[in-house]
Image (cartoon, grey):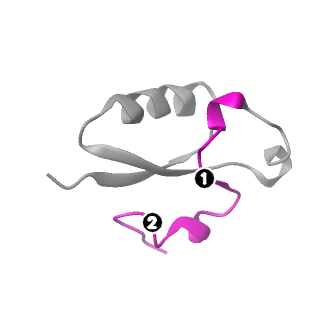
Amino acid sequence: MQKISIVIVGFGNIGRAVKRVVESSTDMVLAGVVRRPITMNIKDPELANTHVVSDIRKLKDKIDAYRQ
């Protein structure tokens, strides 16, 4: 079975919960997390080993569906 690549936009309470669900899923893989530019310098241990960007277009080649 091919895994679905997804991106989480926003990393508040819901984004954190979604990340845990995706990581425990057998049919999804986390391609990255999009955060606001102002929060990019904040180090978050939950995002270690996760591709973090401030613009979703930087991840468009890593996700299954991208609509501009």
**Could you tell me which secondary element the residue under label 1 belongs to?**
loop
Instruction: Pinpoint residue 29: horizontal percent, then vertical percent.
Output: 37, 47
| Mark 2 neighbour class, 10 Å CA radius: few under 14, some 14 to 19, many 20 or more | some
Along the horizontal axis of the image, is 13 left or right of 7? right
In the image, 15 versus 45, the foreground residue is 45
Tell me which numbered mark, 2 or 1, is placed earlier along the sequence.
1
Residue at 30% over, 33% down: 25
Residue 24 in the image, given as x and y percentages of width and height: 35, 29
Residue contact at pointers 2 and 1, CB within 8 angstroms: yes
Residue 36 in the image, given as x and y percentages of width and height: 74, 50
Spot the residue most to the left: 1
The secondary element bearing badge 2 is classed as: loop
Residue at label 1? 51
Instruction: Give how far apart the Cα atoms at labels 2 and 1 are.
Output: 10 Å
- Residue 55 shown left or right of residue 14 in the figure: right
Looking at the image, residue 23 sits to the left or right of residue 50; the answer is left
Residue that carries the numbered disc 2 in the rendered image:
62
Answer left or right for 20 relative to 33: left
Q: Is residue 58 above or below residue 7?
A: below
Majority secondary structure of magenta residues: loop
Q: Name the residue: 35% across, 66% down.
A: 65
Location of residue 11 with respect to 6 vertically, above or below? above
Amino acid type of the residue tagged 2 in the rendering: Lys
Question: In the image, is residue 53 part of the stretch drawn in magenta?
Answer: yes
Task: Specify whether residue 26 is painted magenta.
Answer: no
Q: Which mark is residue 15?
A: none
Classify 54 as above or below 30.
Answer: below
- In which quadrant of the rendered view does residue 12 lie? top right
Q: Check disc 1 and give the amino acid type.
A: His
Residue 64 occupies which quadrant of the picture?
bottom left
The span shown in magenta is 45-68
Q: Residue at x 59, y 24 (%)?
A: 13
